[in-house]
Amino acid sequence: MSGAYDMDGFLAAYETVMAKWPAGREALAVRTPFGTAHVNACGPRSGPPLVLLPGGGGATSASWYAQAADLARTHRVLAVDLIGAPGRGTEAGDRHPRTVADLVAWLGAVLDGLGVGETALAGHSYGAWIALHHALRAPARVRRLALLDPTGCFAGYRPAYLLHALPMLLRPTPARVRAFLRWETGTGAPPARAGARDREALDPDWLRLQEAAAGFPSVSKPVTGPRPAPDALRGLDVPVLLLLAGSSRTHDAYRVAARAGALLPRAETVVLPGVSHHALPQAAPAELGRRLTEFLGR
């Protein structure tokens, strides 16, 4: 992308998606040693907390709009923009996140700033990776854990996914972001070849926000790392709901389900057919909301 980044365009696209959230939502600013975190909140203040983490790349907390209203009926929903990723938070703190321990410390500081001790925690993709590491290192703070098509947790990426993502990662532009998302979700395939995936239309406002996030300025790179150790996963004594995208091109959903089921002692695993990785959580079937609501209400 040439020229200065269009921050006004990004913020306008962000607010367009946020307009799909329930009425009465609040924007909260939480100071941490890593900078000020932006949190979109809704639901009863007296309700049990539910912290939501979006995926990486161009995803933001706004992406939870399709689930926010249902979840807010029973919980205080607290959706956080990730540190080092596009969003409305700032990174003007004394430290930059560089390790998994830093991410866990950042999320812990966000919870402290929100006045949350123990919480239900849900994450999608890269956000699920952060949520799982937080649960492993601070299990006393996690009441229940929901992982939506998590990446880097139980299996690696498919080579074809990495090859298609490479141009966007090397030089992100709106056109490259759009092409990649249409490939992964199947919305760009000819109807005869798309099959069930062709019915999964992308929300144009959400897609516009992903495009606007291309080239977003950040003072630090997203933290990456290895998958959690098998022994650590076997020792996780927290109820886990694993919701996998059956049409994901990111990884083999059934392989992830098998490995997670063999390692996590308290896991419930569900493969959602006909939905892709990047369509979660905003374009998922109604079953996603039902599964989340039932799991969180137990």
Image (spheres, rainbow, N blue to C red):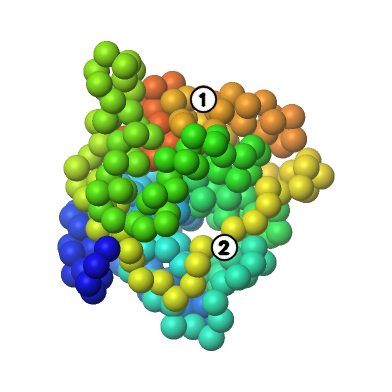
Percent position of residue 118, x then y: 59, 58
Residue drawn at x 51%, y 50% is 126
- Indicate whether 7 appears above or below 67: below
Closest to the observer, 291 or 218: 218
Q: Farthest residue toward the top?
A: 192
- Label 2 secondary element: loop
Which residue position holds label 1? 271
Mark 1 is surrounded, within 10 Å at the Cα level, by few (under 14), some (14 to 19) or many (20 or more) other residues, namely some
Residue at (69%, 31%) from the top-left corner? 259
Point out which mark residue 223 bears.
2
Task: Determine the residue positioned at 44% across, 76% down.
Answer: 219
What is the distance, in whole Å, between disc 2 and disc 1 at their CAs? Answer: 27 Å
Asked if 118 appears above or below 109 in the picture, the reply is above
Question: Which residue type does callout 1 highlight?
Answer: Val
Q: Nearer the viewer, mark 2 or mark 1?
A: 2
Q: Is residue 292 left or right of residue 255?
A: left
The 10 Å Cα crowd at callout 2, few under 14, some 14 to 19, many 20 or more, is: some
